[in-house]
Amino acid sequence: MRHPTEGTLRRLVDEPAGVADADREHVTGCPACLSGLTAVQRDAAAVSTALDTGAVPDVDAAWRRLSHTVAVDERRRASAPAPARRWRNRLRSPVVAVVGVAALLAGGGAAAAADWLQVFRTEQIAPVSITQADLVALPDLSAYGTAAVVEEPDVREVPDAAAAEQATGLTVPQVADLPGGLGGDPAYQVGDRATVEFTFSAERAAQAAAAAGEVLPAPPAGLDGGRFRLSAGPGVAAVWTSGSGAPGLVVARAVAPTAESSGVPFETARDYLLSLPGLPEDLAAQLRAFSGDGTTLPLPVPAGLVTSSVADVDGAPATVLTSRDGSVAGVVWVTDGVVTAVAGSLDADEVLAVARGLQE
């Protein structure tokens, strides 16, 4: 196979979801292309540095303008097919594919829900290490079937905590003591429940296997055409701006993700999907290590860029994430089916102090 062009390598850095599966697979197994990808990443970093004029952007104001524009635009075109196309494009993202497949494979319970069977509910979160090679090699969801958006989140700004609670039904946690350098009232963002339905296709999976030079294992009875429904939200986020104009602290809360099946037993789907060609073996091995009780949500963590550790927040097990340079940290935990996260331009001790001091 020919080597991908330099433009394709650059697109792997800027927009990996827009690169064909065949090119991503080639780059993963080609030392020359991986070397070229490293060079392109260095060039991208150099260009970013060169374009940095030193001006301090008003990121918070820009985020508010962008959120308002998106909300107005989506409401105006609610009856048009464009939003669905945009969501389908987002679902093709390798990162979204990791989260979607991981949520389906993380565990399995059994609870009747109309004609659906609940196969996953989030009670705790555990990190899953994702490398650059994993992202390059990972096929998007369309390699295994089709995805359709059932409910779209309408992310928008609201004036205060009372409006956020009314819009989401969630209690907005209050920060008792803000870290140094932060003050004033936060900006509030809310989003509605989001639901995506995925239908497994043996034909598409066979094509993906053939592209990887593999033969698709025979699907178990009932899996071809089997449907899986992933839901999350609604959610709310309170954002405080730092002195540089960037978000200094974010406190977010959302109804935790769940997944349901049209009737395919969890164990059947898990064992088969983890055996499919195209899913990086190191990622599959991590997913296999999760317990089978259907309560642990895998959280993708960039290997080498973010470290993770465990902590306790008011009796709940929590995952602490810290950037390699220590400039950004976050902590996330689950209580009674609700995910809460605290993150910002702080160190791990500071975000933990905020998290443990939240008031309901």
Image: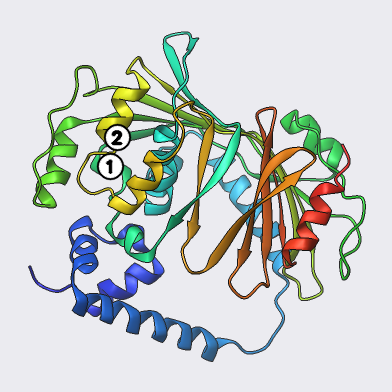
Tell me where residue 335 sits by quadrant: top right
Secondary element under disc 1, as helix, strand or loop, is helix
* Residue drawn 59% across the image and 87% down it: 52
Q: Is residue 17 left or right of residue 339?
A: left
For the residue pair 147 and 322, the one nearer the viewer reads as 322
For the residue pair 86 and 307, the one nearer the viewer reads as 307
Is 87 situated above or below 225?
A: below
Q: Which mark is residue 36?
A: none
Give the class, few, some or many, for how many residues have Cα within 10 Å of label 1's Cα (few <14, many ≥20): many
* Residue drawn 67% across the image and 88% down it: 54
Q: Which mark is residue 146?
A: 2
Is 302 situated above or below 279?
A: below
| Number of marks present in the image shown | 2
* Residue 92 in sight: no
For the residue pair 284 and 160, the one nearer the viewer reads as 284
Q: Is residue 331 left or right of residue 118?
A: right
Residue 316: % across, % down = 72, 38
| Labels 1 & 2 near each other (Cβ < 8 A) | yes
* Residue drawn 25% across the image and 38% down it: 144
Tell me where residue 20 sits by quadrant: bottom left
Alpha carbon of mark 1 to alpha carbon of mark 2: how far?
5 Å
Secondary element under disc 2, as helix, strand or loop, is strand
Residue 226: % across, % down = 29, 22
* Residue 154 in sight: yes
Which residue type carries mark 2?
Answer: Thr
Image quarter in which the N terminus is found? bottom left
Q: Is residue 175 left or right of residue 121?
A: right
Residue 249: % across, % down = 76, 60
Which residue type carries mark 1?
Answer: Ser
Residue 310: % across, % down = 64, 51
Please give the residue where the numbered disc 1 appears in the rendered image: 142
